[in-house]
């Protein structure tokens, strides 16, 4: 595995090796000595790291996380990153996300819609180091394009295209082709990879602004 950023390690939990971050547990994950296991079957970002994709994430990075849900993945990110703005629009998950943030001073939940970045442009600082996107909606590439304004010129877009959220009737390969073509209008695609065996019909994309 390629070098991991500070604050992210591979640790043993009852004989099983796993990615891990330091922080309070969130979703019943195994813990040991202050570390918490990061399960790639429950986190697309962890799957990307397990598959040795070069996310470019570094300790202390400023992150805009789109589609934070109840905090499963974004809690791990906030354990080692810097200021982490977590956008979620569903009322039930945002309540759980607020609880997750209580023990994480760098995690800032935003009850907003990632499709409407104007609603949080006054809160999120410009030139963030990374946008991590995990939204289950149509128009996933469009969401990434709308939020490009926040990303520094040398920053990274780390996103996952969920084929079934875009079009349940189309072949995933066709969905991925359309999405990456749309992303390429404003981003330079650095790496793409499907996330099997961890997640079916998901394409991970790492890109930087053109």
Image (cartoon, helix red, strand yellow):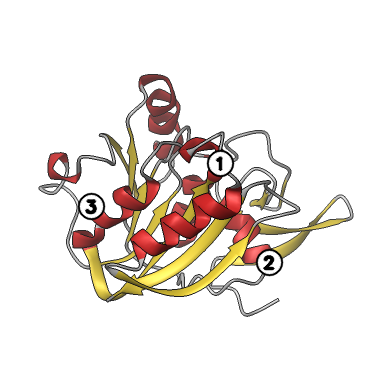
Q: Quadrant of residue 10?
A: bottom right
> In this figure, which residue is indicated by the disc labeled 2?
51
- Please tell me whether mark 3 sits on a helix, a strand or a loop: helix
Q: Position of residue 7 (x, y in %)?
A: 54, 66
Q: Which residue is mark 1?
A: 170
Q: Nearer the viewer, mark 3 or mark 2?
A: 3
The reply to whether the C-beta atoms of the residues labelled 3 and 1 are less than 8 Å apart is no
The mark that comes first in sequence, 3 or 2, is 2
| Residue at 46% across, 46% down | 134
The residue to which callout 3 is attached is 146
Q: Is residue 121 visible to the viewer in this orientation of the structure? A: yes
Residue 84 seen anywhere in this rendered image of the structure? no
86 to the left or right of 167 = left
Instruction: Determine the CA span between mark 3 and mark 1.
Output: 24 Å
SS at mark 2 in the image: loop
Label 2 environment density (alpha carbons within 10 Å; few <14, some 14–19, many ≥20): some
Identify which residue is drawn at 43% across, 30% down.
99
User: Up-down: is 98 above or below 58?
Assistant: above
């Amino acid at each position: 595995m390629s070098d991991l950023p500070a604050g992210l390690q591979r640790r043993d939990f009852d004989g099983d090796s796993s990615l891990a971050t330091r922080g309070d547990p969130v979703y019943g994950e195994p813990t040991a000595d202050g570390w918490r296991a990061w399960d790639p079957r429950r986190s697309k970002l962890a799957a990307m790291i397990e598959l040795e994709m070069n996310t470019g994430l570094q300790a202390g990075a400023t992150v805009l996380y789109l589609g934070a849900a109840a905090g499963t993945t974004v809690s791990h990110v906030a354990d080692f990153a810097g200021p982490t703005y977590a956008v979620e629009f569903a009322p039930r998950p945002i309540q759980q996300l607020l609880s997750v943030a209580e023990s994480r001073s760098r995690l800032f939940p935003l009850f907003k819609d990632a499709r409407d970045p104007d609603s949080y442009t006054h809160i999120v600082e410009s030139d963030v180091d990374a946008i991590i996107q995990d939204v289950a909606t149509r128009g996933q590439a469009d969401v990434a394009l709308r939020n490009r304004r926040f990303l520094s010129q040398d920053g990274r877009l780390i996103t996952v295209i969920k084929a079934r959220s875009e079009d349940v009737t189309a072949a995933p390969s066709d969905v991925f082709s359309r999405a990456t073509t749309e992303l390429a209008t404003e981003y330079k695609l650095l790496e793409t990879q499907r996330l099997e065996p961890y997640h079916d019909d998901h394409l991970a994309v790492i890109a930087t602004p053109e």
